[in-house]
Image (spheres, rainbow, N blue to C red):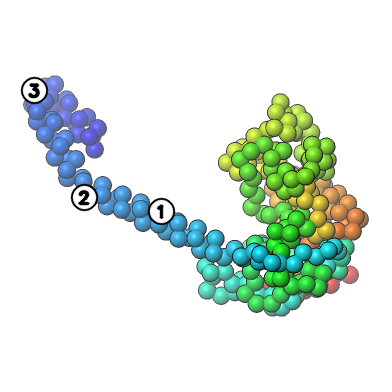
Amino acid sequence: MTVAVIAAGAPLVVVGQLDTGGLIGANLIAVRALLPFTRFMHLLAAFEKADESLAAAQRFAAVPVEPADGTQLPVFRGGLELCDLSYQGPEYPTPLFAGLSLSLEPGGVGAVTGRNGSGKSSLIRVIVGLLEPSAGKVLVDGGDLRQIDLAWWRHQVMYLPQELNFLDGSIRDNLLAARPEIDDAQIRACLDRAGILSFIDGHPDGLDLLLVGGGRNLAPGLRRRLGLARALAVDGSLVVFDEPTEGLDRQGAEVVYALLIDLARSGRTILVVTHDAAIQRGAQAVLDMDTLVRESA
């Protein structure tokens, strides 16, 4: 407003229709006139920030409390069973899904499909232990996930979320966060299997390449491949991928297909959320969030 008053008044001062004192006075009046409005805008911004904080607190409250005395299985073989599972988040008036059941023996391959908003990603987050089911159970090798040490559990699961986020640190830092004991040779092996090693080697910083903004400085396809590499670094018995081919070109999709085949041959249990028909055809069971579980031929 000060700029506008001066811009309008300066020509009048130049032609003598307004003196400098009058211009200053007009500016002060304008500032005082706008003061209540300015205070209102500041108050509105404060309310918006309060709403954001409340929403963040609600999201945090939805994350399961990790039991301090949870069980760690001596060996996790990869058995996964969903028993009449339901989930209703605090922001939803009705359950996202209800009564879902699926059983995968160690080394089994399953796929999850369904329309957008059917709860596929929420189901995956329940399995990983990031959300708690409203009803039903997740059994891992026959044990109730609610009784399992979740910190231990997440080191058994090679998890690729649909919405990727990375630490603001180096490529190396991000894979070490998934599995602190791995060395550079193992990191490079994970990057190679994910089809991103040639890009890293071609960059002057190599493994020291910094990610910023949660990895937003990488192209979407590279971010997804890096997410795959981070999941591989965990080297667990259960593979849980959420839309692994999303945003990838044909070459990138072929990398994912080859990787899933390799993981299946190594005896990992695999559950993939996907709309990719090629991946669905390779599954022993398909959980359709819109209908029922059907066994593949």
Q: Are marks 2 and 1 in contact (CB under 8 Å)?
A: no
Q: Which mark is residue 49?
A: 1
Q: Amino acid at mark 1?
A: Lys
Q: Nearer the viewer, residue 159 or 102?
A: 159
Q: Which part of the image, by quadrant, shows the C terminus?
A: bottom right
Considering the numbered disc 3 on the image, is that residue within a helix, a strand or a loop? Answer: loop
Q: Amino acid at mark 2?
A: Pro
Percent position of residue 165, x then y: 63, 48
Residue under the point 73% across and 30% down: 206
Q: Are marks 3 and 1 in contact (CB under 8 Å)?
A: no
Q: Earlier in the sequence, mark 2 or mark 1?
A: 2
Spatial separation of the CA atoms under disc 3 and disc 1: 48 Å
Q: Which residue is mark 3?
A: 16
Q: Which mark is residue 36?
A: 2
Q: Which image quadrant for residue 129?
A: bottom right
Percent position of residue 106, x then y: 87, 65
Spatial separation of the CA atoms under disc 2 and disc 1: 20 Å
Between tags 3 and 1, which lies in front? 1
Q: Amino acid at mark 3?
A: Gly
Classify 259 as above or below 25. Answer: below
Q: Earlier in the sequence, mark 2 or mark 3?
A: 3
Q: Earlier in the sequence, mark 3 or mark 1?
A: 3
**Is residue 127 in sight in this rendering?**
no
Classify 204 as above or below 249. Answer: above
